Amino acid sequence: MRMKTLLAGSVLMGLAASFAAPAVAEDSVYIQLPTYRTGPYAGSGIHIANGMSDYLAMINERDGGVNGVKIAFDECETGYDTQKGVECYEQAKAKNTLVFNPWSTGITLQVIPKSSVDKIPVLSMAYGLSAAADGNTFPWVFNPPDTYWDGLSAIIKYIGEQEGGMEGLKGKKIGYIFLDAGYGREPIPLLDNLAQKYGFEVLQYPVPGKEMQNQASQWLSIRRDRPDYVVMWGWGAMNPTAIKEAVKNRFDMSKFIGVWWAGGDEDARAGGTGAKGYKSVSFNNVGADYPALQDIKKLVVDAGKSHTPASTIGENLYNRGVVNALYMVEGIRTAQEMTGKKVINAEDMRLGLENLKIDEARLEAIGLKGMIAPIEITCANHSGHHPLFIQEWDGEKWTSATDWFSPLTEEVTPILMQASKDYATSNAPWPTRDDACPAN
Amino acid sequence: MDMLYNILIDPFVQMVDAPDFLIQVVWEGFVAGVLYALIALGFVLIYKASGVFNFAQGIMVVFAGLSLVGLHQKGVPAWLALILAIGIMAILAVCIEKFVMRPLVGQPDIILLMATIGMTYFLIGLGEVIFGGEPKQMITSELGLPTGSTAFEMGERGLVILQHIDIAAAVIALLMVGGLAVFFNRTRIGRALRAVADDHTAALSVGISLNQIWAIVWFAAGIVALATGIMWGARSDVSFALEIVALKALPVLILGGFTSIPGAIIGGLIIGIGEKVGEIYWGGLVGGGIESWLAYVIALVFLLFRPQGLFGEKIIERI
């Protein structure tokens, strides 16, 4: 993939790359992995890409695929660029991918309308359009285990607990520093809603994509405004720069909380010892002592079949890439069970994802017990709004600062359902679901 | 009425109420300005010698920084890595002169600009192949550069924090400017370089080697890029996102003129301080995030009065 960038502009290489396609045998299924190992967001994207591809490779090596069906996969470099992401989607469609993982909210928003036409499920794990959790309106989009709105509500709930209860939020000032893109703007409607309900003030600090490594102004504003807490929605080079600036400006790190994508090991490490106490909400534990990760190390990484440095196995974003691949593999397995077919197609995959259930027993069998909470996706609820926890950087690694706890689901759901209706209305005629979900 | 108060009065009330914060804002703007000026210097050097707008200056900053950190990560001691990184920039300069500039002698300026855009993408790819796409932490302390900060208390709650690395950046920038001024004005090569800048053909006719001069000037721009990469990398990380930040030098060049070293410095400081003060005291009126375009507004306002830039040469062509 890097070589592609090196030779960008070279017609010969471009043609050669366009003809390259993975060999898909009759007893295999194909999944494209849109990734970004290059560009300003590579610092985050590389670990995710490694985790995803290593897990799929391990399933092929250890189990011979899913019930004997190998997973053929390749990567499509998006550079976190929406236009390139849509090109990857078109390539994935042409190659009959089972599922499309955009790995960018901007790309997700672009492919949502296409997915229902092309009948390709979009798996936007804990990112993308929060309202897409409504399976009745978005039958082809999945965002487990939680939406951005779940993540934000969990952070606000945690802050409330630090203040002695949700009523303690009244009169507080909460700063929101965010990547000024679809991703960073996604939680703002809910943030404003919760601010009105609980009586806290929101101070917004947008960081333009071109200024990710030049955040002095935002942090000077934070220093002037003295918010009680700062919540961060950052990605790529924005995260380490923000943490460094927070340390530089002597912001109380225990009151600086990022979304799960602002929780990379390298993000926090950049702040040195001063970053101790920085927090981020999370849906997966860190560490490499899980049997499945040990299998990855033995069968894939040590065998020289991976880009991954062994030292990064078990880091936060790597494990999150593994979780994304786990959802896909279990989605295939579920689809196989439900359809009775071994080699499934994208429509079958949607059925698998819509009935995905990974309980404790299954997690133990997989070899990832304890890494994530059990999850269940239903026809009507494509996210699940699962429990989350707060992790804290101890200066060297992430540690759990809380037990698993539920986001403010009851408060978020009505707003989310309204947003879903609004989306369908503003994008009319929005396709209706063929098979209505059973009432819960 | 409220709007007028918020624009014309309130920002100044804030400045008077919290002078420590104003000092901090100006200092941060000064440091940003120094870094913009360093990037702009690289552009100016190339433009002065060859009339080429070097679009690749930003990626040269990244490439130089990555070379330094990448070599250190491979076990090379920091100071040796620094020397080797300088060597890499020298090799790069020679290659650019031989394989890009020389074959394009006499071509229109737009062709040379396109060539530097091509070089940008080539260097991005080469950097990613050699060093990987992950951001890397600058080896600040290993290079003997100062870390930490000094805080000055002002009044009951006032506080001004100066990062030692920022002070070092300012000092190094001044030394580089001084060094380049001496190089241009007091050395034989410097005079030859100015002759090339004035008129290629005339310079050639008196025996000045165009190829040699171009290699030297690209090497000088590489050294400036390395210094910029170290300083900016110490503030954030060395990553490919820095290449975009380097475009902040454009308003500096518009303001200071494409051919003036003092212009790059003064322009950098005006833009750096102006955008920070504007963002902090006036940005909130429009929801923040104005500094990315405010720099261009500042530059354009100056252009209304001095179209050639603050220190640019006024060219009068008689018809």
Image (tube, coloured by chain):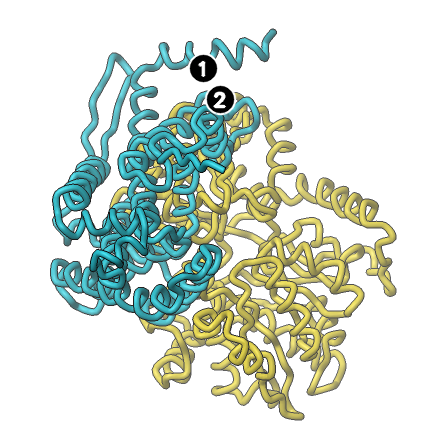
Q: Is residue A113 left or right of residue A129?
A: right
Tell me what residue is drawn at x 70 percent, y 81 percent. Answer: A336
Residue B11 image label: 1
Q: In this view, does A297 lie to the left or right of A281?
A: left
Count how many numbered circles sit on residues in the image: 2
Tell me what residue is drawn at x 47 percent, y 42 percent. Answer: A232
Chain coloured cyan in this rendering = B
Look at label 1 and name its amino acid.
Answer: Pro
Q: Mark 2 lies on which chain?
A: B
Query: Mark 2 near mark 1, Cβ–Cβ under 8 Å?
Result: yes
**Which residue is outermost to the front?**
B319
Q: In which quarter of the image is residue B15?
A: top left
Q: Is residue A407 visible?
A: yes
Q: In the rendered structure, which disc, 2 or 1, sits on the residue that comes first in sequence?
A: 1
Residue B282 image label: 2
**Residue B58: percent from left, percent from top:** 37, 52
Q: In which quarter of the image is residue B213?
A: bottom left
Q: Mark 1 lies on which chain?
A: B
* Foreground pick, B1 / A257: B1
Decide: is A411 above or below A309.
above
Q: Can residue B132 be seen in this view?
A: no
Chain A representation colour: yellow
Decide: is B230 above or below A185.
below
Decide: is A288 above or below A394.
below
Tell me what residue is drawn at x 26 percent, y 66 percent. Answer: B94
* Foreground pick, A354 / B252: B252
**Residue B149: percent from left, percent from top:** 20, 34
Look at label 2 and name its amino acid.
Answer: Trp
**Quadrant into which the N terminus of chain B falls:** top right
Q: In this view, does A276 lie to the left or right of A108?
A: left
